[in-house]
Image: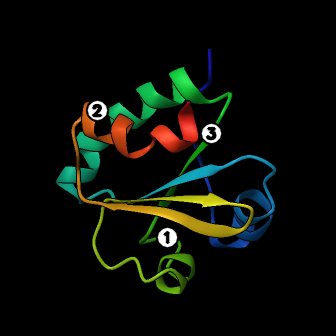
């Protein structure tokens, strides 16, 4: 079983996300964001089921303003998937588990 999603900071982003040898999902969130709290347990479940194929990380946009700004993250939650250092997919807004699984199928199957 996978462990809980780890947090990633602006300082670690390049090394942890862009230089990863497997796809990385980054959940951009904030403490005060209701939809972020809705989607968080779903992402934790997906992390448990798919951490062999996809690295799941989260980034607090209030504590780490640089990376969200670089990737034009204007609304949260925003879930970005990075492959080989490139943004491969961006999902904006809270979605139910089935919708997220469908959106992420390219990376989890």
* Residue beneath disc 3: 54
> Gap between marks 2 and 1, in whole Å?
27 Å
Q: Is residue 5 visible?
A: no
Measured as percent of width and height from the top left, residue 99 is found at: 26, 39
Write the residue at 42% across / 72% down: 62
Write the residue at 34% across / 32% down: 41
**Neighbourhood count class around disc 3 (C-alpha, 10 Å): few under 14, some 14–19, many 20 upward:** many
Q: Which mark is residue 22?
A: none
**Neighbourhood count class around disc 2 (C-alpha, 10 Å): few under 14, some 14–19, many 20 upward:** some
Residue 95 found in image quarter: top left
Q: Earlier in the sequence, mark 2 or mark 1?
A: 1
- Kind of element beneath mark 2: helix
> Gap between marks 1 and 3, in whole Å?
24 Å
Write the residue at 55% across / 63% down: 88
* Quadrant occupied by the C terminus: top right
Relative to residue 18, is residue 106 drawn left or right? left
Farthest residue, direction left: 34
Measured as percent of width and height from the top left, residue 35 is found at: 20, 51
* Residue closest to the eye, 63 or 53: 53
């Amino acid at each position: 079983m996978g462990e809980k999603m780890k947090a990633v900071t602006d300082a670690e982003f390049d090394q942890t996300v862009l230089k990863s040898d497997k796809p990385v999902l980054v959940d951009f969130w904030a403490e005060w964001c209701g939809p972020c709290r809705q989607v968080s347990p779903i992402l934790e479940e997906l992390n448990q089921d798919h951490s062999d194929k996809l690295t799941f990380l989260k980034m607090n946009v209030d504590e780490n303003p640089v990376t969200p700004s670089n990737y034009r993250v204007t609304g949260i939650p925003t879930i970005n998937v990075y492959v080989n250092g490139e943004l491969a997919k961006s999902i904006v807004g809270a979605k139910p588990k089935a919708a997220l699984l469908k959106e992420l199928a390219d990376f989890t199957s």
